[in-house]
Image (cartoon, grey):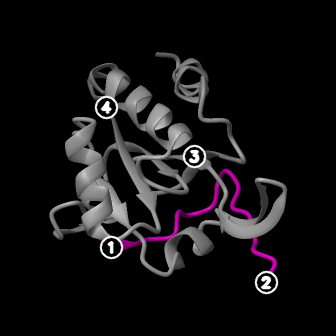
Amino acid sequence: MTALTKLSAGQQAPTFSLPDASGKAVSLDDFRGRRVVVYFYPKAATPGCTTEACDFRDSLDALNAAGVSVIGISPDPVEDIKAFADDFSLTFPLLADDGAAVAKAWGAWGEKIVQGEVREGILRSTAVVSPSGEIESIDYGVQADGHVAALRTKLGL
C-alpha cells in the first residue's frame, strides 16, 4: 500500500471535478466564495454511510443558512449514488470518485480493518474548506454516528 499524505488546516484544498448522481460534473471551484464541507464515505446505502448522509440531509437547512455547502464523495459508480440519493432524499451533491483518485489526493484512502480483515479503502473523513479554498479543518477516521452534530458544534451552528 502507498502511504498517503494527510492534509492539514491551512493547505489549499486539492481541486476536483467529478460526476454527481445525474452524471453532471461538479467541481470544488463551483463552491468558491462559500464554505463547504467535503466528506468522504466508503459505500452508498451501507448502514454507517446512510446514517451520516441522512444526518447531513437533516442538518442541511442550518448549514446552508450559515453559508456552508455539503459535498459527499465515494468511489461508488454514478448509478449507485443516484439510487442512494433517491432512496434517502439526499439533496446535496454526491459525487462518484471512480478509482478513488480524489480520495487519495485528500488523504482519505488507506488501510482499515473491515470484519477482521485489513483492507484498503475510503477512510471516513471530513474537511471544511474556506471560501478561498483553504482547508479550515480536516478529520480522518470519523465515526458516522454523531459526526454531523460534532461538526455543527465545531462550526458554531
**In the rendered view, would you say 24 is above or below 31?**
below
Q: Amino acid at mark 1?
A: Ser
The answer to whether one can see residue 132 in this image is no
The residue that disc 1 covers is 17
Name the residue carrying label 4: 67
Depth check: 61 or 124 in front?
Answer: 124
Q: Is residue 10 magenta?
A: yes
Image height check: is 76 above or below 10?
below
Q: Residues within 10 Å of mark 2 (few under 14, many from 20)?
A: few
Residue, far front: 115
Residue 32: % across, % down: 31, 55
Q: CA distance from mark 4 to mark 2?
A: 36 Å
Element type at marker 4?
Answer: loop
The span picked out in magenta is 1-19
Kindly identify which residue carries mark 2: 2
Q: Amino acid at mark 3?
A: Thr
Nearer-N-terminus badge (1/4): 1
Dot 2 falls on a residue whose secondary structure is loop
The numbered mark, 4 or 2, whose residue comes first in the sequence reads 2
